[in-house]
Each structure stands twice: as C-alpha cells, then as structure tokens.
Amino acid sequence: MRKGKRGLGHVEVILSFVLFIVAVGFALYFFNPAGGDRLVESSLTYAFREISQNTSVGVETFSVVINNSEIPTSTNMIVLEFSGIEGKTRVETYDGDVLESLHEDEFIYVSSGDWNSIAFVFVMFGEEFEETDGLSGTHDANYYEVGSSNLKEVISEKRFLVLNQTYYKDYLTLKGEEQFNLPDMANFGFSLVFDENDFIIAEKEIPAGLEVFSETERVEVLRDNGNIIFADLIVKVW
C-alpha cells in the first residue's frame, strides 16, 4: 500500500509540473513584448487594406478616335453615345488638354473650338469628375469610333482628405470594431506623398522606444482638379 501511494505521488508531481510549464508558455506567448510586436506587425497589412478600400474610386477610360475629316469646321459640339455607363465624365485629348463635357442619359456632349486638330480623345467616367452644365448638341455616329476601354481603382484625394479629418476628430471610433477594427494595443497613421512639398499626413505622435512597422506603395491618385498622378501611400503601425 505504501508503494502504491508513493507512485501516485510521483504522477501528481509530474502532472503538476507539466501544467505549470504549459501555463508559463501560454503567459509568455500572449503577454510578452515579442508577442505584442507580432500582433502589431500583423495589423499593418489589414490597416493598409482598409485605408486603400476607404479612399478608392473606380475610373473607366475609353479610347475614342475622332473622324475629324467628317466634322464641319463650324461644329463646336460633338455627341458621343455610351449606353449603360454611369458616372460623370472627363474628356482629354491625346496631348492632355481637357475639353468641356457633360454626361446626360446615354450621351456625352463634348465641346472644342477646333475639332479638325483633334484625332483622338480619352473619355473617362467616375463619380468625382467636374462637368460643364448647359452643353447640348446632335448625335452623329460618323464623327467618332469608340475603341478599347480600361477600368481601374485609384485613390481619391477627396476621400483621403475626409479620412484624414476623421483620423484627427474621432481616432478611437475610426480604429474601433465598427470601422477598421484594429487591436487595442495597435496604433496607426497614414500619409499620401506627391512630393516633398505636397502631401497629406494623418499621424499621431509616436512614443519613443516603440517599434514602428510601415508599408509604402506607389499608387495612382485622382486629385481634386481631375488629374490622375502617382504618389506614395504610406501606412504605419506601432
């Protein structure tokens, strides 16, 4: 009987030791600084995706050949037909000159004082373009030929500025589970840099000694003036 009791005691000691090691390992994994760093670092990819999605808009561009030999010299307005396409328009020549335009129903009204010098235009559709009111004209399919199209997502400067304002006015709500849903221990900031003198930054003060994880991506940006240019989108998490 005494031997049996002694053996049972050894088993209990071993089990207690195993449980202790498991508990210590669990605590070290979830509460040590390295574990926190891993959590913060893993939040970077998620934060970058959320910022991109919250500031992006779609832009669809069509290439249009202008049959300028068919257009009378007295004609200032041509009308292009685009059925089933939504959004406001921006029309540019091959050289980048912006023409006045208006999208109504399935027609795009485009104005130029010299159609005989224009052989090609890009017709862009997007929700944030500025149009010219009051344009009108008659459609003539002989004036143009619609070619290829391209649909892409670009960062909207307008939306980025709105997100920037929200960051400073209501950071905790933006970070919380109803929006970005980032961990409590993770903080973030973001910026859009066009050049050294032209940028938009949303970034709280970073405490000294914290490791900062960052990601930079070259993106296309639809600016307030309707131009689409490249900039660096930078997201930081700490």
Image: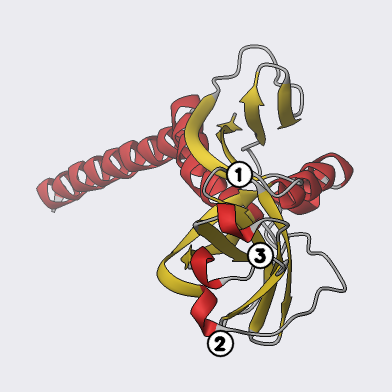
Give the vertical position of 192 relative to 180 (above or below).
Answer: above
Give percent across and percent down for residue 215: 48, 32
Quarter of the image where one finds residue 35: top left
**Tally of numbered tags:** 3
Residue in the picture at 66% in, 16% down: 196
Front position in the image: 6 or 126 = 126
What's the residue type where badge 2 is placed? Ser
Give percent across and percent down for residue 8: 19, 50
Q: CA distance from mark 2 to mark 3?
A: 28 Å
The kind of secondary structure element at disc 1 is strand
Q: Which residue is mark 2?
A: 83
Does label 3 or label 1 sit earlier along the sequence? 3
Q: CA distance from mark 3 to mark 1?
A: 37 Å
Q: Are marks 2 and 3 in contact (CB under 8 Å)?
A: no
Q: Which residue is mark 3?
A: 73
Does label 1 or label 2 sit earlier along the sequence? 2
Residue in the picture at 13% in, 52% down: 4
> How many C-alpha atoms fall within 10 Å of the one at disc 3: few (<14), some, or many (≥20)?
few
Q: Which residue is mark 1?
A: 221
Does label 2 or label 3 sit earlier along the sequence? 3
What's the residue type where badge 1 is placed? Val
